[in-house]
Amino acid sequence: MPKKVVYEAKIEHLQILDEDGRLDAKLAKDTLTDEQVVYLYEQMSTCRQFDEIAFKLQRSGRMGTYPQNKGQEANAVGAGLALQKGKDWVIPCYRENAALFMHGLPMHYVLLHWMGDERGNQIPEGCLMTPLSIPIGTHMLHAVGIAWAAKLRKEDRVVATFFGDGATSEGDFHGAMNFASVLQAPVIFYCQNNQWAISVPRELQMNSATVAQKALAYDIPTIQIDGNDIFATYKATTDAAARARQGGGPSFIEAVTYRLGDHTTADDARRYREQSEVDAWLSKDPLIRTRKYMESKGLWDDKRQKALEERLSRIVDEVVKTALEIENPSPADFFNSMFAELPPDLARQRDTMRTSSLGLDPDQAGLRSTPEGVR
C-alpha cells in the first residue's frame, strides 16, 4: 500500500501592536476600543507600581519571597478583560496579579499571601478564582475539573488557567491537557512563555520549536501570540472563550513574553542571564509600546501620566497600609476555616484550647495501662 499523510498542522503567530506602538488596523478590527486600551494601560501600570512596592517590602524584611510580574502584564490584562467577571474562572499561577485585581480580588490579599498570612488565600465570596499556585503545574488539573463541572451543570462558564513554559514539562500539564481534550472541557490553557524556567532557558528545558505545538498531540486548537501586545492577548483569549462557549472545548495559547525581573526576590538572574538579553526585551515592554500607541492616537500625554502615577502611589500606599496593619489572626481561625460545620470535639478544642479528649481516653493516643496501680 502507498504511504499517505495522516496528519498535518500549522501554528500561527499573532501580533497586532508592534514594539514601536504601530497597530495593524485590519487585525485590530472588533478588538479593543480606545477606552479599553486606556483602561488596560492603567491596569498594567497599577500592577507595575504594586510590583515595585512589593519588592521594597521584601527587601526591607516586611514580606517574604515575592515573584514580580514585571514585563508580563499584557497577558493578565488582555486575558482578564476577555473573560467575563463573575461568570468565568481565573486559575492563576503567580504572575497574573492584574487579572485577579480586575476580577475583584482586593489587592492586599496578594501581599498577605506572600507575608505568610493564610487570610490572603481566603478568596472572597463572588470572586471566581483559586489562590495563587506555587507548585508548578498542579493547578491546571483543578482548572479542568472546574471546567468539566461547569459543562456537566450546563453552566455558561469558561475557565482560564495560567502557567509558565516550564510547567509544560510537568506531568500534571499533560494529564490536564488529555483530560480537557477527551472531555471537551471549556478551558483555556494560557502559557506565559517568559523564556526561563527559573534558571533554565527554554531551549534547554524542551526541544520543541514552540510551546504551542504541544497542544497538537491532544488535538487542541493552538496559537502563538506576542504576549506583550494587549490587542493580541485580548483577541486570542476572546476567540478561545467564544469557542469554549459554543461547545468547541479547550484551547491553548502560547504568549511569548519575558520576565524582566528575577524569578523571585530569592533569585539573582544576573548569575545566568546576559544583560544584553534583558536589554533587548526592555524595548518590548508592554507598557512602553502601549503608551506609544496611545500617544500616537492623542489618548495620552505627560500630564495624564503624572496624574496616573500620583493616583497609583496613593492607591498602593493604602493597600500596603491595609496589609501591614491588619489585626492579628485569632487561634480560633484555624478551626473556623476548616469545616463548614465544626465537629463537637474540635469545637471543644477551639473553645478550651486543650485536647481534652486525649486526656479522657488515653487509648485514643495509643497509650495503654502499665502494671496494676501504675498510670
Image (spheres, grey):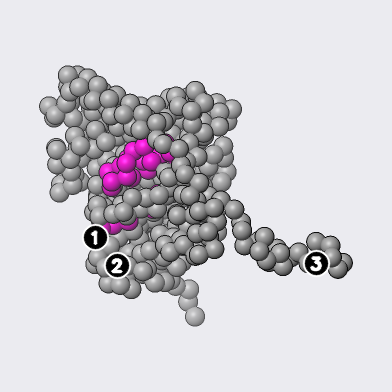
Q: Above or below — where is 297 with respect to 310?
A: below
Q: x%, y% of residue 297?
A: 13, 29
Amino acid type, callout 1: Ala
Amino acid type, callout 3: Ser
Outermost bottom residue? 1
C-alpha separation, residue under disc 1 versus residue under disc 3: 68 Å
Amino acid type, callout 2: Gly
Outermost front residue? 373
Residue to which mark 2 is pinned: 248
Q: Is residue 92 magenta?
A: yes
Q: Which mark is residue 242?
A: 1
Q: Which residues are magenta?
A: 87-113
- In the structure shown, which secondary structural element does the residue marked by tag 3 occupy? loop
Q: Above or below — where is 16 with respect to 171?
A: above
Residue to which mark 3 is pinned: 369
Disc number lying in front (1 or 3): 3
